[in-house]
Amino acid sequence: MKNFLLSLLFLITIQTIHAQSYMGYFSDNYAGVQGVLFNPASIVDSRFRADINLFSTSSSLNNDFYGLSLFDLSKSSYDVSKEGKKSPSKNNGGIVYSDVMGPSFMFNIAPKHAIAIFTRARAIGNANSLNGELVAQIEEGLDDANDFNINVGDPNFVGHSWAEIGASYATVLLQNKQHFLKGGFTAKYLLGGINSYTNGNDIKTVFNQTNNPLTSTFGTTGTLTVGTSQDFITGNEDVKFDGSSNGFGFDFGFIYEWRPDYVSYDLSNAKAVDNNFKDQNKYKLRFGLSITDIGSIKYKNSKQEIYNFNNILTQAQIEATDDIEEFLDLYAPPTTTYSDRKVNLPSVMHLDADWNMHKKFYLNLNGNIGLTNKTGINSSSQANTLIITPRYETKWFSYYLPINWMEYSGFQMGSGLRFGPVFVGSSSVLTNWLSKESKAADVHFGVKIPLYQNKFKDTDNDGVLDKTDACPTVACPAENKGCPWPDTDGDTVLDKDDACSTVAGPVENKGCPWGDVDKDGVLDNVDKCPSVAGPAENNGCPWGDADNDNVFDKDDKCPTVAGPVENFGCPIVDAVVLKKLNEFSKSIVFDNGKATLKAGSTEGLDAMAVTMNEYETAKFTIDGHTDNVGKPASNLELSNNRAKTVKAYLVSKGVKEDRLTAQGFGADKPIASNKTAEGKSLNRRVEINLMK
């Protein structure tokens, strides 16, 4: 009788499985495609180029009735009912959950966009409002009681398994200095598996003991509702996913990162080797919010049986039944209906905060809040949890230490690690190792192919990445694929700049030898007239003859005035010119008895200077003369000074000084008689003569 009551009232209360998967691991920045199960936004701006899950699973044990020494369960001598620590209450419960992730992947399709595709099989069972005090009472000797009156209450159980195919998209929503925000969305196609539920309503049991099985009676009141999508209760072992039972679901989430050191990750300052800092975690604080498992599955032609307990059976009748199903059919024949039923997914809100304490050390705080009604008929739900996880994290290795409070089982402590493509962990393994009263046990592990974001290699630091550098150990320009430019002709002009790469030539001529277009023997680089032949002495240009007197300018002492060759190209001063000069000299007037020019008497001198400059090679004598009035010595000095005055004036007008000679003769060379005034006037003169 005792075993029967235990089986009837608490079909699954002793061992249950906790509903939160991959605890401690999903907060890792290298969780990859597993991270999308908790927050779809996690896959964008991730540390992966791509992440491929081959196989991973997560399971855990969680209840609030039995505390066990899980490490002793394998011992044949361990008796769960005797050595287990019971915590009975009128509202015990637990959760059954299993999660298997099949081939799945995520990858970045652009710097600010990422997608993921995943496959997943899941099963969850909820047990709530179970009278644990009744279980304890039955185990402790209910059979010895003469009679009993038991209030079973409103026990509720829901079991649900399904498969899902999910497609996720995530993008960067904001990137402004220290503020970074990303969001993600997952759409899921759901394929129904098994859905079953049992719900009691005010079930009470009365047993009257008479020490005679034929007269001892067992009576129960209340209602029990049992439903299933597949008739597995009757022993049907061919349980499978039902293609006609399907539905849709979705997840969404946001992640904000505070990046106070954002200047260090400024892309405008990034080098190619930095790979836009894709391999770096850039935040000091990270906050996440997501809601997962929004949606439902519609089961076709689902079976529901309602048992109305209001009969009295004898102890003999009960003990004659082979199993619970036979008992129920005998005791309270059900009302059976078949209809389509919608089963909601166990929606959860995830809150996450991650602190980069120092370099590779992090501290994560995660809260999971179930959003569905735990006591509703056929209502799957997930347990509320709070997890604090310190971790050490690198690209190839992570170690995490989750410390968590879980609904039903209380505080647990575990450990886990990730090593390249393999991860394994448990959020309760340390508690189970140390405690003899553990109410939870879980484990997760997986194998994947991680393709990390890497800082690119540039061995020679020439700005050309090794993967495209044809000469990765020699620093050279990017234009030549990281290799040195050749210099085939050895003229120090690199082939890329050498217009004549096979013939040596100077740098100034782009590596080509200088030519001689006019064939005058003067190379074009120094030939000032490269298209007209000319002597080297004139820089390759022909000699000029500006005055067209057949005397080249180089030999022409008067290049601007035509003159005969015999006079070096200068005009010859003849008697006509001398006469002209002396005509000009007649207008020269000095102050009386002095060597100074009288005002207004320089017009003739100006004309004289112009004429002298036309005959650049001619040299002239300026001869001063006086009459015989006065002392001879004074007259000689006066005539000499007046000649010098004329010379000085002509020099001031541009006549070269070395072409002029000034001298005085006094009264020694009269041209007329000094006895008359007219003769004296003629004798006071300045004469211009050619220097012999």
Image (cartoon, helix red, strand yellow):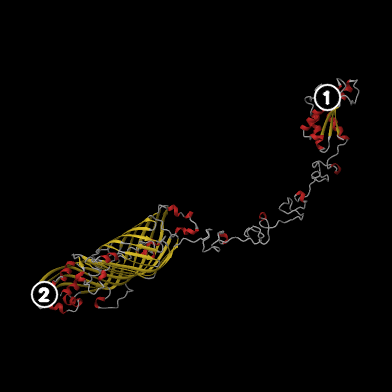
| Image position of 258 (left or right of 332) | right
Q: What element carries label 2?
A: strand
Q: Is mark 1 on a helix, strand or loop?
A: helix
Which residue is under mark 1?
637
- Amino acid at the residue labelled 1: Glu
| Image position of 621 (left or right of 263) | right
Residue depicted at 52% across the width and 58% down the height: 461
Q: Are marks 2 and 1 in contact (CB under 8 Å)?
A: no
Where is residue 99 shown, x and y percent of the image?
A: 32, 69
In depth, the one of 447 and 82 nearer the eye is 82
| Image position of 478 (left or right of 40) | right
In depth, the one of 590 and 264 nearer the eye is 264
Residue 131 visible somewhere in the drawing:
no
Looking at the picture, does residue 268 appear above or below residue 49?
above
Question: Residue 423's quadrant in the figure?
Answer: bottom left
Q: Residues within 10 Å of mark 1 (few under 14, many from 20)?
A: some
Looking at the picture, does residue 618 appear above or below residue 353?
above
- Indicate which disc, 2 or 1, sits on the residue closer to the N terminus: 2
Which residue is under mark 2?
217
Q: In which quarter of the image is the N terminus?
A: bottom left
Where is residue 458 shown, x and y percent of the image?
A: 51, 60
In depth, the one of 144 and 603 nearer the eye is 144
Q: Give me the disc on residue 103.
A: none
